[in-house]
Amino acid sequence: MYFNDEKALIIQEDGCVQLEVNHPDYEQMRKELICFADLMKTPEQFHTFHITNTSLWNAAAMGKKAEEIKQFLTTHCKMKVPLSVIQQVQKMMHRYGTLQINKENESLYINADTSLEQDWVQDKEIRSLLEEEIKEGKWKLKKQNRGILKKVMTSKGYPVIDKAGYDDSEQLPISLRDVTNSGEMFHIRDYQKEAVEAFLNSKNIFSGSGVVHLPCGAGKTMVGIYAMAKLQCEVLILTSNKTSVKQWKREIADKCNISTSAIGEYTGDNKQIKPITISTYQLLTYRRDKQHDFKHMKLFSSRKWGLIIYDEVHLLPAPVFRATADLQATRRLGLTATLIREDGRETDVFSLVGHKCYELHWKELEAKGWIAKVQCHEVRIDLSEADQKLYWESAAKYKHRIAGENSNKLQYIQRILHHHAHQKILIIGQYITQLEHIADVLKAPVIHGKSNNETREAYYNAFKQGKLNILIVSKVANFAVDLPNATVAIQVSGSFGSRQEEAQRLGRVLRPKKGDNEAHFYSLVSKDTVEQENSMHRQLFLVEQGYTYDIKEVSGDEKDGMYLVQ
Amino acid sequence: MFSEEWINTIPLSLLQQIREHASYQPLLQDGDAIEQLLQNKSKLKQAFQHLDPYVKQSLTYILIYFPASFFTIDQLLACDIDDVAGAELKAAVIQLSQLGMLYVFHRHRQQERWFILPQDLVSHWFSVCFSLEDHFSSIAKENTMDNDMISCDGFMEDVITILQFVQYQPITLTKKGVLPKRITHMLQQEIRSLDEHFQFVKFKEEKYASYPPYVAVLLDYSLRLGLTSISDDQLHIQPSVCNEWLQGSEQEHQIWMEKFIHEVFYPSTIYVQHLLSIIPLLSPHSCYAVADIMNQVRKELKWKDDQLEDEILTQFHLRCLKPLQALDCVLLHYDEHDDLYISLSEKKRIAMLYLQSDFSLLKPPHLQLDVQFELQLMTEKQDQQYKITKNSVMKACLAGRDGNYLCSFLQQVSKYGLPKNVEKCMMDWSRDAHNTNHGSIHTHNMHEMTSQRQQYQHVPLLFSNSCQSAEAIDVYNYMLDSQEINSILYSRYKDFQGSIEKKYLTFDDIYAYPHVIPSHWMHAYRKYHIAINVQIIETALHLHTYIMVRHKDENVYFVPKRLTKCDQAWKVEGNIKGRGQLSFHSSDWQEIKLILPGMNDKNK
């Protein structure tokens, strides 16, 4: 039969494989698929995997054969497997291992299997990156082109195994504590260990470089720390903001047997370069004007780093992309929860920092209790009369903001606060005036871009220590802010249709909770406005991860707030 | 012509005469229609067994020389046929027409009768007469690879795209009578790129050559089936026909497609016609090497031009298989040596899809057409996936749907139901579509309109399931005189100006002036004077028939080919049926009898 619904897979010509979640063999299929395909999204009924060149090369590196994959796909597909997919599997797995970069006497060479067709040599772009042909199947490679050659060849479907290795780095003895400085028992979770093992796996085509994908609150910092402990070398850590720099520093000092004097902050206030140095993307990309150089980029070469950690790697700015291309002799670890970029440069992250080497999905971790179970609510609120008039009379470019700042939202914030009284609540928004107004009414502190670091730290600490129940934050808290005890997040406005922002904001309440391990995420949107439309796009990433939004509509004169939760 | 159409066209009296033919009596049970018998392969086989041997043989020759083409008796007689006498061929044609197995047309001006095998029975006859399919070796589909250029069921999706394109209001044609280039270009963006598959289509008129071939094929299909029509220089949609088409059974769709193929894509080369006729005989579960099919057909049908083998294969591939592949009738496969294989496309349709909370829809390859139509109406195709978007819901609303309808439809066909968030959004969007200023909505269908609202008001329920046709619809508005069809592509029978023969043919229709033949020539087996013998032989030659003569104390059937006078005597050359050539001198002639097949051949 051409279509057999009893089977588990739907395979598309573009290499997307849809696995039916309710299929009795789901677990087994999933385990098989993950060996040669990347898990892309996990909505309720079908989980989407993508067979990519890289996923196939990694499968080949792990000893998987093209025939096994072909057999698996044809056996379990509801319909016939598209030829293009079969051809891709055969072609890409066949290519694996035929090209290598080797180091001989400090020079780099690319060696090719001469028994195979050398069609890649005809490619002008690849040719321009090679120095000279030494003999058949052997070319000398310009050292500075190592990264870019790998990027170009990978993008053209030729996997190059880089056996030239990494530069020697300064050693740094780091060990993990069993009991943290703060007196708590500490151990690395299994999936965190697996992530680092996958990163360092010598069989992996991009061994020693790669991106680890874990949900917010899953402990990506611990993955970085464990990688440092494994490699025992000097480390440069790049992250998104100063708060995060401090968190990294605090966590390293708390979890590792290392002197705090070995940990340096390289920020606007403090330019320390130590065996472990933590800096921000913002500082690295600072320059006085376009005519001047990025003077802080020298940080990359200021020590013999054995590892560079890119925290929140999805935020990697373009100049750092370029600098990273020259760092092929240094191990690179990217950490992210949401590798989605509205500029579509996700692939650049993969090719320069390294490919995705480990991923755990949100719902998977939730099921294991490593992150909180979050109930998502979208509350659609009528525009207030005044806002409605303003909204319809305004030009399109102002509508999103007017809808975002809808004054009717305030009463629903109060109802939610009332409903979740005594819980730790974050109110997150886009517009400072709106947030300050809410802060005034609620008599709660607010943190935004203009708040200095001391103020931020003070409020964050007070919140963590239970001295504050409500904290109002702007987008400064979108990333890398660790507030483990927050159980409710109320998003009052956001940046248009940013999927990443939505996911990161939800991530603020994902840290496991004591008791029922539950949290709530409310998104307040103005009904029948562009904000409602953008909201759907914002939710897309989370919906793809298997989250569902409970949508409620409320009118302005509604008095009962209890409908908000079941 | 297809059997059903022919039966619906001929007078009832003629149909009754066919029904009452003695050969059918054991086969036709009470109430059975003649077309049911003809469509039933095993009954057809039984009917074949009841035929006279020379009729069977003649039928095989008709299949070989005119598998699905009109022919005259003279054309049949001119074929290279040794083992059946001309009069037998003629008599066979009459007998086959009396059985309704061969259709007769009359061209009054030329005073000619033309014959043709029912197009839908050609494959059946190949099976009955040659059992060709038993000789093909097949391999498992799994051992080959599909050609992915063509996705399953894409043709129907593209037809639906065309219909949805036209549905909002008629498209005004240019002065030349073709679609404006801009519209053609927009259409091309929405459909698959398959022009290469139709590089050999012929256009009815030069002006249509401006159409990209695949656009022309889609338009032509919709016109021939009456889904669209051209009037007042506009291309119109025919909603009731469309509804009928969307809800047509698998079998009906197959017949409509076969008609379309017969009209437009039937090859002119006889050998390629043979190959094309074989395709329906293949098992749907197997995969066949095209070269193997050709070799078997060549052997069984005794092709003569061996040297043209490659050319025939190429023609078959380019002119038949590629269009058929694009029309989703066959799947082409290749093995590791790049050899071509063919299998039949799956026809079973499914009314189920998968809808996810991220607004994406996954669908099985052969979705029921009415479901496919709604799906295309309410979604946007993004890469390989269908997505429900605000724009797509608005588009559906413009076509007369509302939120409740869309949601209940999806609830009904989605294996896992309708996710709540999707339902909520769809209801909101449909409400917006009805409230909003239609002028701000943009979908690809919105061409050449004065206002969106006007458009919406015109076709509020077009194609919706609640829109039932009030009258019986003849979906395939087939007409023999193809001049009357608003078609774009060249029709096979374009030049054939004939009408269906409404008379029941008898042997008198082939033996001119039988009354002038002395009856004892046909009924007495006796010796005559040599002059009479010569007259009998001359009559046999004239009628392309044979005589019974005594040869070496044996009665034989002799087909005279040439009569010559030598040395005051006569010599006749010819062959004895089934035994080869022979010549008689007048001194050899003893008893003789003229045989007219159909008239006095029953005791031979």
Image (cartoon, rainbow, N blue to C red):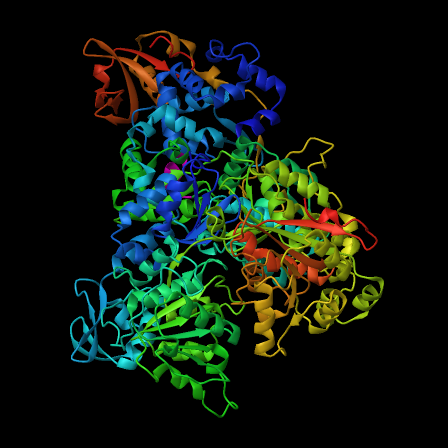
Q: Is residue B127 above or below residue A14?
A: above
Instruction: Tell me the chief SS of the magenta region.
Output: helix
Report the front residue among A25 and A73.
A25
- Residue B160 lies left or right of residue B258; in this view the side is right
- Residue B273 in the magenta stretch? The answer is yes
Q: Position of residue A435 (x, y in %)?
A: 70, 69
Kindly give the residue lying farthest to the bottom in the view shown. Answer: A291
Residue appearing at x 40%, y 19% in the figure = B45
Q: Position of residue B218 (x, y in %)?
A: 56, 49
Kindly give the residue lying farthest to the front in the view shown. Answer: A183
- Residue A128 in the magenta stretch? The answer is no
Considering the image in quadrants, where does the N terminus of chain A appear? top left
Q: Number of labelled discs?
A: 0
Q: Is residue B282 above or below residue B317?
A: above
- Residue A378 lies left or right of residue A465; in this view the side is right
Is residue B4 visible from the viewing direction of this image? yes
Q: Position of residue A531 (x, y in %)?
A: 69, 62
Report the front residue among A497 and B165.
A497
Report the front residue among B482 and A496.
A496
For the record, the magenta segment spans B268-277
- Residue A318 lies left or right of residue B85; in this view the side is right
Report the front residue among B377 and A563.
A563
Residue appearing at x 49%, y 92% in the figure = A291
Considering the image in quadrants, where does the C terminus of chain A appear? top right
Residue appearing at x 48%, y 26% in the figure = B102
- Residue B156 lies left or right of residue A176; in this view the side is right
